[in-house]
């Protein structure tokens, strides 16, 4: 199986740029086709990989916002290259068939999945990053640019396309963004063409200090297991039950002293316990702040939508638990609403390291995109839990780790066999009124996103505990086998036999089952 090809592909592009000693397409070049896409930040790596894979060699320039040093591109990015009609059949400019076209793809990640759903249905203009305003600086002789994405460098446009971690009709209740109305199914059907693409595995990340505390409480650091602190191999991963996660993220526990494992409070067993996150700094597991901290994505996030559906049954049922609780900054628990997956990493890391990098939503200002208040205002060390897709932090460069749920690690293998619950089927969607030029490129990206071989080459991510990321949708590739390895051999990549669309249209609230088929080689 091919692993983490994205980083290799980007490196190859950068080397090509270095050998040329110049950019491939300057930011002032007028594109033949310009596409604005918004939505799921969880899938930013997928978008980068899929679009890059379509580009002619040596023609790609990558533009990233520099709103946060070290997390460039967390809110906005853009990709500019030459496409050819072999890679993208049916390529046209203004309705005329062409063999090549210079295509600029903007991707807004700020605000998450709903920004690729609700504003498209409503025809609402939202902010996107310009690259041609003299606001981008080339990084050395590479084909990567860092761009100022504030003020006049943001343009308000109605997105052509969106990508969401769950289907558009799920963006109601806690998933409705503050700058849009709840999705009306009839309006969505009238405005959008929706393309189910692939299954994406999600995980429950915890700050490094909480990870080690759970390892200690569950006996993983002691004989006979004797794992090292932060060891993220399967045998050394701590686990929480679905019910425990739901208890924490629904705001039922004020302080970690209330949370007990085998009858013992976590806070009573961590005195003197230390760990190294890999940066050479020895940190204490015990904290200066014992409140439960929940790093939550803002309303409208698909990452949030899938977690609420899977753990809180919201908005799947009127009896579902809410993630939008008030909490208490003094007594706990404390909820921190952040914008994208990059901000999620900063939030978790802030509590592990006692830093103040992440910013959270400031609702009192009444501005949807206003993130001015520090998450960790006092630079305290605390234990935090969050939400994240399984294409992040494969090398553990950020100071958080994924845990098991009900004893199962968030791997392709466990999801394939129905042992791991936290996965959903994601969609691409585009407005029906856009040009055929744009539709051709968007549909090619969406088609590639659902291809087993493309997933195997570009969208499989390797962790210490196993491979994770994406799987193709089984109803599109019914020749899956009873094991994941045999399925990859037969179909060229991982395929998910289970489905959330057995009762009709896609509904990620449904319990996934393997649909009836004549295939007798099912993983049951």
Image: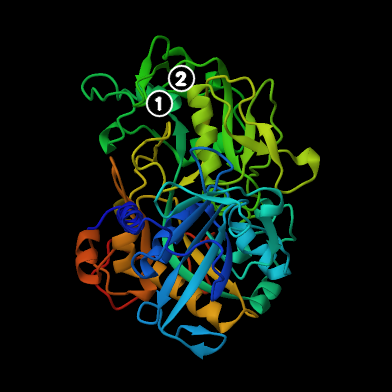
Image spot of residue 509 (x, y percent): 54, 59
Mark number displayed over residue 260: none
Say which element carries label 1.
helix
Residue occupying the point 43% across, 18% down:
285
Q: CA distance from mark 1 to mark 2?
A: 7 Å
* Residue tagged 2: 266
Image spot of residue 171 (x, y percent): 64, 59
Q: Camera-side residue: 268 or 10? A: 10
Q: Is residue 36 above or below residue 287?
A: below
Image spot of residue 229 (x, y percent): 32, 23
Using residue 218 as the reference point, say whether residue 382 is left or right of it. Answer: right
* Residue tagged 1: 214
Q: Quadrant of the N terminus?
A: bottom left
Q: Are marks 1 and 2 in contact (CB under 8 Å)?
A: yes
> Label 2: few (<14), some or many (≥20) within 10 Å?
many
Image spot of residue 121 (x, y percent): 69, 70
Say which element carries label 2.
helix
Q: Is residue 223 above or below residue 326?
A: above
Q: Quadrant of residue 485?
A: bottom left
In this view, which residue lies farthest toward the bottom? 96
Q: Is residue 385 visible?
A: no
Q: Camera-side residue: 410 or 230? A: 230
Q: Camera-side residue: 471 or 109? A: 109
Q: How is the image coloured?
A: rainbow
Q: Is residue 351 above or below residue 119?
A: above
Q: Quadrant of residue 472?
A: bottom left
Q: Is residue 7 visible?
A: yes
Residue occupying the point 52% across, 43% down:
342
């Amino acid at each position: 199986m091919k692993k983490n090809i994205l980083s290799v592909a980007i490196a190859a592009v950068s080397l090509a740029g270095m050998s040329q000693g110049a950019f491939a397409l300057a930011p002032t070049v007028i594109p033949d086709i310009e596409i604005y896409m918004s939505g799921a930040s969880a899938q930013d790596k997928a978008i980068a990989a899929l679009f890059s894979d379509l580009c002619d060699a040596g023609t790609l320039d990558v533009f990233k916002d520099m709103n946060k040093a070290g997390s460039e591109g967390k809110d906005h990015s853009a990709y500019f290259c030459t496409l050819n009609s072999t890679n993208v059949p049916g390529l046209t400019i203004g309705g005329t068939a062409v063999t090549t076209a210079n295509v600029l793809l903007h991707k807004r990640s700020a605000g998450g999945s709903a920004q690729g759903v609700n504003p498209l249905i409503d025809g609402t203009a939202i902010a996107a990053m310009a690259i041609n305003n003299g606001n981008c600086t080339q990084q050395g002789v590479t084909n990567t640019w860092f761009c100022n994405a504030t003020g006049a460098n943001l343009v308000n446009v109605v997105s052509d396309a969106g990508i969401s971690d769950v289907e558009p009709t799920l963006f109601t209740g806690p998933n409705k963004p503050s700058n849009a109305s709840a999705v009306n199914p009839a309006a969505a059907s009238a405005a959008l063409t929706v393309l189910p693409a692939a299954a994406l595995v999600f995980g429950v990340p915890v700050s490094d200090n909480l990870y080690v505390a759970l390892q200690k409480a569950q006996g993983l650091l002691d004989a006979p297991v004797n794992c090292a602190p932060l060891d993220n191999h399967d045998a050394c991963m701590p686990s929480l039950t679905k019910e425990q996660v739901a208890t924490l993220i629904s705001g039922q526990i004020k302080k970690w002293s209330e949370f007990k494992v085998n009858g013992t409070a976590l806070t009573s067993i961590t005195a003197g316990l230390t760990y190294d996150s890999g940066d050479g700094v020895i940190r204490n597991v015990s904290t200066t702040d014992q409140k439960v901290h929940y790093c939550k994505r803002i309303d409208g996030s698909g990452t949030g939508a899938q977690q609420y559906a899977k753990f809180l049954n919201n908005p799947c049922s009127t009896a579902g638990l809410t993630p939008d609780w008030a909490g208490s900054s003094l007594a706990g628990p404390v909820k921190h609403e952040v914008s994208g997956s990059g901000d999620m990493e900063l939030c978790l890391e802030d509590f592990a390291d006692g830093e103040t990098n992440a910013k959270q939503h400031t609702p009192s200002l009444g501005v949807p995109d206003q993130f001015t208040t520090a998450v960790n205002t006092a630079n305290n060390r605390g234990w935090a839990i969050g939400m994240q897709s399984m294409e992040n932090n494969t090398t553990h460069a950020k100071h958080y780790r994924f845990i098991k749920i009900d004893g199962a690690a968030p791997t392709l293998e466990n999801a394939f066999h129905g042992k791991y619950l936290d996965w959903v089927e994601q969609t691409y969607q585009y407005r029906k009124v856009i040009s055929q030029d744009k539709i051709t490129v968007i549909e090619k990206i969406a088609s590639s996103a659902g291809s087993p071989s493309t997933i195997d080459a570009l969208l499989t991510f390797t962790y210490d505990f196993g491979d994770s990321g994406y799987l193709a949708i089984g109803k599109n590739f019914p020749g899956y086998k009873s094991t994941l390895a045999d399925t990859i051999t037969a179909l060229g990549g991982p395929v998910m036999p289970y489905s959330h669309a057995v009762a009709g249209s896609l509904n990620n609230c449904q319990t996934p089952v393997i649909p009836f088929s004549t295939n007798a080689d099912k993983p049951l």
